[in-house]
Amino acid sequence: GTPVAIAVSPSGNAAYVVNQADSTVSTFGINATSGMLTPLGTLPTGATALGIAINPSGQFAYIANNGGGGDLSAFLINAGTGALSPIACGGGAGCNTDRFQTVPNARAVSLDPSGAYLYVAGQFVDESYVGTHAIDAITGALSAVVKTAGLGGRGMAIAAGTTAVSYVPTFAYVTRSGFNTVEVLRINATTGA
């Protein structure tokens, strides 16, 4: 299925491979001694899956889907087995069928270190975007996207700063491959946007 991205659970018991051509995510158990992978199953994602991020607690996985106007597939991770279960959007505003609507042509996803916010980078023709979603800590569901136009691209990473009280993300770095630049975005510590 043309693997394009991989993430390992924080516990190290499972690996998740995003397959672009058939729009799926494959789960593999990891042997703690040998590192060998054992296939555990494959689930559908949205069209043209490209990126994956797992929240720091290892409860949820999010996949950026480039097709269908840009949406996110969300999954609950079984702590014991590493198996994935889809988290449905539930319909209504902010949903694309059972997936979460995000920026156009989503390509990359990243989480802030606290796991409270999911960031999505997307690019469409000459315009690039960064989207911010709040994450429900209980269900893993995502809020409607807060979108910033004129930025974004193929990759994204979060750099965090510290304060005297808590660990707060400070900047997001976004590559813009078509423009050969890296954008620096300051993150609002209150809203995550």
Image (cartoon, grey):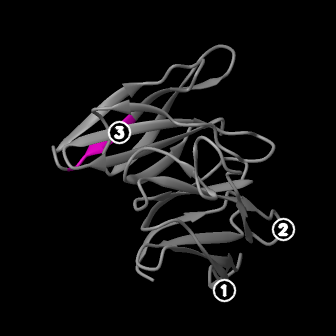
Alpha-carbon span between mark 1 and mark 2: 15 Å
* Mark 3 to mark 1 CA distance (whole Å): 37 Å
Query: Residue flagged by tag 2: what amino acid is it?
Result: Gly
Q: Residues within 10 Å of mark 2 (few under 14, many from 20)?
A: few
Inter-mark Cα distance, 2 to 3 = 36 Å
Q: Residue furthest front?
A: 92
> Which label sits in the foreground, 3 or 1?
3
Residue extending farthest to the left is 179
Residue 13 in the figure: left or right of residue 21: right
Front tag of 2 and 3: 3
Q: Amino acid at mark 1?
A: Thr
SS at circle 3: strand
In this view, 164 is above or below 178: above
Classify residue 128 by image quadrant.
Answer: top left
Secondary structure that dominates the magenta span: strand
SS category of the residue bearing label 1: strand
Say few, some or many: other residues with alpha carbon within 10 Å of mark 1 (under 14 / 14 to 19 / 20 or more): few
What residue do we see at 33% from left, 32% from top?
Answer: 149
Q: Which residues are magenta?
A: 173-177
| Residue at horizontal 24 percent and vertical 41 percent from the top | 127
Instruction: Please give the residue where the numbered disc 2 appears in the rendered image.
Output: 80
First reached walking from the N terminus: tag 2 or tag 3 = 2
Residue 96, compared with residue 174, is above or below; it is below
x, y (%) of residue 34? 65, 83
Badge 1 or badge 2: first in the primary sequence: 1
Which residue is disc 1 drawn over? 38
Label pair 3/1, CB-CB below 8 angstroms: no
User: Toward the viewer: 81 or 1?
Assistant: 1
Q: Residue at x 60, y 58 (%)?
A: 97
